Each structure stands twice: as C-alpha cells, then as structure tokens.
Amino acid sequence: MATVGDPIPGQPLLDALISVPGVVVVCLDKNARITALSDSASQLHGVGPEAVGVDYCESFLPLEGASTMRARVMAIAAGAEMQCLENTIIDKSGANRLMSWSLCRVVDRSGVAGVVAVGWDSAARRCESQGQEARIARAAAIAEQTTELVLLCEPDTTQIVEVNMAACAGLGYTQGELLAMRLSDLVVDGSGRPAPHGRPPRSAVPAIRRGFLKRGDGSVIRVEATTSLREFPDRVLVLNVVRDMTRSAQLAEKLVEAERERRRAAAEAQLLKSGRLVSIGTLAAGVAHEINNPLAYVMGNLQFLLRDLERLCGDPAELRQILDETLYGAERIRVIMKDLGVFSRTDEGDHRSPIDVHEPLNSAVNLTHNEVSHRAQLFKDYSETPPVLANEGRMAQVFVNLLVNAAQAIPEGRSTQNEIRIRTGVELGMVYIEIKDTGQGIAKDALGRIFDPFYTTKDVGEGTGLGLSICEGLIREMDGDIQVESRVGRGTIVRVTVPLADSVRRSPYGLELPAEHSVKPARILLIDDEDAVARTLARLLHRHHVTIATSGREALECLQGSGPFELVLCDLMLPDVNGVEIYYRVRDEDPAMAARFVFMTGGAFTAATRAFVEETTNPVVQKPFDLPHIEGLIRSFSGE
C-alpha cells in the first residue's frame, strides 16, 4: 500500500480485515484528498505514491458522481455512520467502471479524522457468489460493527496499537486513552487488584482465556478472550477478541429467573387445583347428607304410593300431601345440583361477566349448610346491589372457603350461642361482602401470615393452609380485594370487595310467572333425546299442544313441515344434530322462528356449547325444570 506521513493507527487491523484480493482501498482526508492507496487501487488508476494529496473525487470520478462521493466523505469524517454507495470511477485506461464502496471513519494518532473507502468492481462482483459478497462487505466494517471488544497488542509489552469502538464503549475509555495503554494495565482479579497478564500466545491457533478487566469507571467485568498471533506485513501482533461475560451472566440470570417464574406459576396453578379439591373434599360429606335426606323421602313416598295406591285413592287429601312432600324433596335435590353446577365452573379460566353476587353467595350457603348448621346460626343481611364483573364459579369457591373457615372456627354443639352473619352492600364503587363469625378469632402475630400458602391456624388434619391463599389469588384476579379483621375470643370479619360491572347484557324476555289457569294453549315443539324427560315435560304441559322430537333430524323435519310453533323447547346436547346447529339452520331460513327457541340443559357443556350459551340472548333453562318459569316463557312468547 502506498502511504505518506503519519500512518493510520488502524492500518494493521485494516490490512487483516481487507486482505481479500482485488479489493480497492483508498484512504482520504476530510476533504477527499488521498492519504494512502492500496496496491489494487494504484493498479486500478495507474498511479503510485505521487497520488497522495490529490483530490480523489476531482481526479478519478466523472463530474456527475464526484459531488455525491465528496458529500459522503465529508459527512463520515464529521462523525456520520458507515455508508455504502455505488458510483462510476475512471480507470487507468480512461474508461468508466461501476464501483461499489463502503465508507467508514478512522482517526490517526494525532486525532485527525479521515475516511477509508473500500471498493470493488460491481460488474465483477455480481458474478461472485453471495457468500463471497457478504464476506467482503463484512470485512470492511467488522472492526466497528462487531459487539465484541477487539484489541491489537504488541506481543511482549502488550502495548495496545488498535481497538474498535466496541472496546472503547465496553471498557469505558476513549480510543486515544486506550492507544496510550497496555493491555496488562487493565488486567485485574475479581476484587479489582492488579493481576498477572499471563504469557502471550505463541501461534495463530486461537487460545481462550478467562479473567477480569478494569473499566475506566473503576468497575470490574468478567471476560472471556480469544487470543492469537496474527502476522501483518510490517510486524506480528496479538489479536484479542474479548467477550463481556458479565452481560452473559446477567442474561443467564434472567433466563434462570424466567424459568423460576414459570415454575412458580405452574406451582400456583397446581395449588389452585389442589385447593379446589380440598374444598370439594370438605363439601363431599355435607353434600351427600343434603342430597340423601330429600332423596330418602322422595324414594320412600314413591314406594308408599306404589304399595298403597289403591287404598290412598279413597283419601285425596293424604295423597296430595304425599305428592307435595315428594315434590318438595325433589326440588331440594334440584337446588343442590344447581349449586354444585355453579361451584364446578371454576375451570372457566379468567372469564368474567356481569353477575348478581348473591347468586354464588347463596349457592355457597346451600353447599355448606351441613358444615355450618351444627356450629352456628346463619343470618343474611343482604342489600340491593348492582351486578359485579366476576367469575361466578370462582366467587362460589371463595365463599365456600370463607364459610367453611368461619364454621370451623366455632366449636360444635353450641349453634344457638354462635352466629355467622353475611352482609352485602355498595361502597366507593365496589360491592362488598362481609362474613362475620363469633368464633375463636386469630392471634395478632398470626394475622399477617394467613394468606401465606400452607400456613394454617387449624388443628392437624383440619386444613392445608391453602384456602385463604387461593381466595386471595382468585379475588385479586377479578380486580377485587380481601381483608381480614380478627380478635382472639371475639371472632373474625372477612371483607371481600369486587368491582361493579360497566354494563349488563340483558335478555329481551322480561318474565313474570303467570298463574297456571291464565296461560292460553300454545303449540310447542319439544326436542329432547331422553324419552322419559320429554314425556314428563309433555305431561306437565298437557294444557298445550306439544309435539315431541327425540332427535335433531326429527326436529328439523317438524320445523319444516308442521307449521309454526309459538315456542321451541330445545335440548342443547343431542347425539346427531345438536341444539346449537338446529338453531343456526332455522335462523338462516326463518329468523322469527329462531327467536322463539328456548334452550334446555342438564349442565354438561362442550367448550363450543358453553360459548354459545354465554353469547345467546335466547332463554336457557336448567333441568330439572321449574314449571312456573316454563309457563312464564310460554306466556311471553304467546304475546300475552
């Protein structure tokens, strides 16, 4: 390379990075005058050292391209980022040749900035492989583009002779400061005290070293360096490519923390599931008791009727009493199963909708009746409250846990002397639910830990310590809050607050349950694949004209050929064509008839059916049926 004057400090590194044959290198000052030329550049233009000091743009570029090249050189010398461009130059034969250039900034030892222009013949370049093109492009700017710290040093003295900008940034020194230092000056131990640098590498085979370097601000970074001897035209230097392992360690720590967080979330989900199972286990005995009692007199009365029907026919009053008791028992079973259905919907994720908070609260009261009734009297001080935005199943789970806790804080056998009181109301834009008991209370030193997982004040075998932790998590997920006040010997107050719903989706059917005699006969299509259920409901609706379809296909045939119906009672879960599909088919052909659908369900939903139930504005009724409610629907659809 033809040069003149003070050499560029980066010349050895530049030689190493642009050693690809045929690459043109032109070093320029800030005014685009030549300060050095590579052999390839000299051959391209047919000049030698005498070209140093010549205006490159004026002498070797056509007039139309000179101004663009000059502007780029001046901008980069002033501090602009590396740039690439394509223009035409004049070769030694006087012919125009299209060249591609990469321009980057360099600073000599005296602080004077210049520009290194690395170029290649565009026409010839286009004939090379894509991989070779990438290699040459990277070679021109790798020293400044790499994020690794690159330092070229003298083998014996470790005097630094060249660094890239990443080294300046990573070590906290200016380029001039580093060029005046030895690498051994930066080597320290983990505490920041000077440490031996070690022997220089003896070959071009890279060796890996690990240690610590001291930054300009006095901080210490852990590094891993790949060192090797590199032979340059004028001398042999040590090439150090240094990686800051402090950042890698921080990244590794973040990855470990992310994995720890993932495992914690998975553990919390498992705890939630475990807590729900604990709640179900606690309820199991009480639910069995609540179901078995009414079931006992339902079955007993039915057996009695079968045995003594002939005798009883002579005494209608006694027969009516037996039937009334049987229906009352069946109704109790229906309510219990409805409450269990609410409790089972805790697997709906974070789905929230506007609900009346008293619905899950009453379900929880019914489910915990057996647990509470032997320990305390339960009182409800309900106020009229607007809908809240919550998950009904999860609210029921919270209330079940809180009621069971309240009951277990009271000794058995003195129910008339103790009470559990439930209050509801609205305060500061939130609905609150207070559950107050007259139990033994919680000690002050334990009160701060009651929401910790696995912490419990109950006797061994009575609690897992998960209940309140799960309750807090569920309420927080619904943007609510839960607070506890307690005094030993005086009892405990648990206060839950949940946000109001912004709006409530209302069904268009405002129903008032009519007296039986006021309902006019209506044409009803009853769709249910359970024959016994269909016949029972048809028998209850004997004053109306009921058509029964026991499959989806049969229902579609009735809807197409039997004329209009005032009401269609359609089971959601059918084996061939389900209720949702029947509804959509009818809606496409007769939207007015689709508006007369009332859906029936026993509570078992697929994901798609559940989504439909949540979105539809058609009424949905639960099995077993509430006959007055059905009659009210008939009256509404009949236009009365």
Image: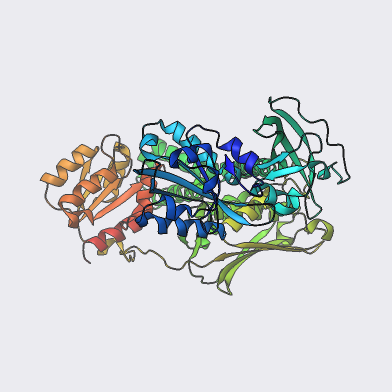
Tally of marks = 0
Front residue of this view, candidates 284 and 185: 185
> In the figure, 543 relative to 305: above or below?
below
Q: Is residue 70 left or right of residue 428?
A: left
Query: Residue 285, located in which quarter of the rendered image?
Result: top right
Front residue of this view, candidates 85 and 558: 85
Residue at horizontal 74%, vertical 48%? 179
Q: Could you say where residue 499 lies in the image, as x and y percent from the top left?
A: 54, 66
Q: Could you say where residue 74 lies in the image, as x and y percent from the top left?
A: 51, 59
Q: Is residue 622 left or right of residue 556?
A: right
Tell me the quarter of the image containing the C terminus.
bottom left
Residue at horizontal 67%, vertical 35%? 234
Q: Could you say where residue 412 lies in the image, as x and y percent from the top left?
A: 74, 51
Residue 316 visible, this orientation: no
Tell me the quarter of the image containing the N terminus.
top right
Residue 486 visible, this orientation: yes
Residue at horizontal 51%, vertical 72%? 384
> In the figure, 338 relative to 531: above or below?
below
Q: Is residue 386 left or right of residue 411?
A: left
Q: Is residue 549 left or right of residue 118?
A: left
Residue lying farthest bottom? 428
